[in-house]
Amino acid sequence: MRYTPPGGSDWVGGTTGDQAQAYDPVTTPEYFEGVLSRRMVAFLVDATMIIGPIVLLTLFIFVFGIVTLSLGWMLFPLVSPAFVIWAICYNAITLGSPASATLGMRLMDLEMRTITGAPCYSLLGAAHVVLYWVSVSFLTPFVLLVALFNGRRRLLHDFVLGTVVVNNETRAALLRRTRF
């Protein structure tokens, strides 16, 4: 499989030592300009997209419980598993799409790539959200400060999974043109 990452040379599948990383903040800074702040906004948009349907489901169960004289309220224990399944599916489907971005990331002109520049895929998207919530739950939200101390603005779960969130090609080209 032949893949040419942006700012890099041809890459043939497989990793050897310090494989050429597609996104270098020194040689291609346009891919990282403003990423962290727009990533936070994208997170809020995605959180709304995930929580919104769960709130509607909860309201439906509440009304259904009233109509069925409280029998429908036995569905409330299913809300938590539905939330987890929906969050994983949302991230897997959107990050595994050709845009390699969730809806919030698309709105903010961001995309997720592997460190070698390859597009994200569904299993990686699902693992990304699971590892994010595990790391924040066990290591406290202070783990998010890791992004302030590296040039690629990667979070802990990005390091573990070998991913990087960058500006999409359109935004990077615009930043490249305005810089010179």
Image: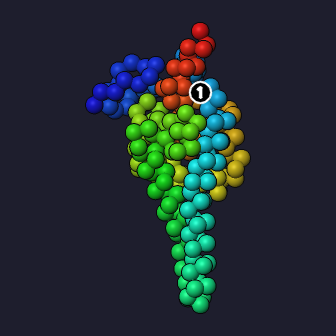
Q: Is residue 21 left or right of residue 71?
A: left
Q: Is residue 92 left or right of residue 42?
A: left
Image quarter where the N terminus lies is top left
Q: Is residue 152 visible?
A: yes
Residue at image location 65% in from the left, 29% down from the top: 34
Q: List the single residue furthest toward the front.
A: 67
Q: Is residue 99 above or below residue 88?
A: above
The number of numbered discs placed on residues in the rendered structure image is 1
Q: Is residue 55 above or below residue 173?
A: below
Q: Position of residue 152 (x, y in %)?
A: 59, 30
Q: Position of residue 127 (x, y in %)?
A: 48, 51
Q: Position of residue 6 (x, y in %)?
A: 44, 22
Q: Is residue 145 above or below residue 133?
A: above
Q: Nearer the viewer, residue 73 or 120?
A: 73
Q: Position of residue 149 (x, y in %)?
A: 68, 32
Secondary-structure class at tag 1: loop
Quadrant of the rendered image containing residue 107 = top right
Q: Which residue is mark 1?
A: 32
Residue at image location 58% in from the left, 67% down from the top: 56
Q: Is the residue marked by circle 1 packed among few (<14), some (14-19), or many (20+) residues within 10 Å?
A: many
Residue at image location 61% in from the left, 78% down from the top: 62
Quadrant of the rendered image containing residue 61 = bottom right
Q: List the single residue furthest toward the left.
A: 1
Q: List the single residue furthest toward the top.
A: 180
Image quarter where the C terminus lies is top right
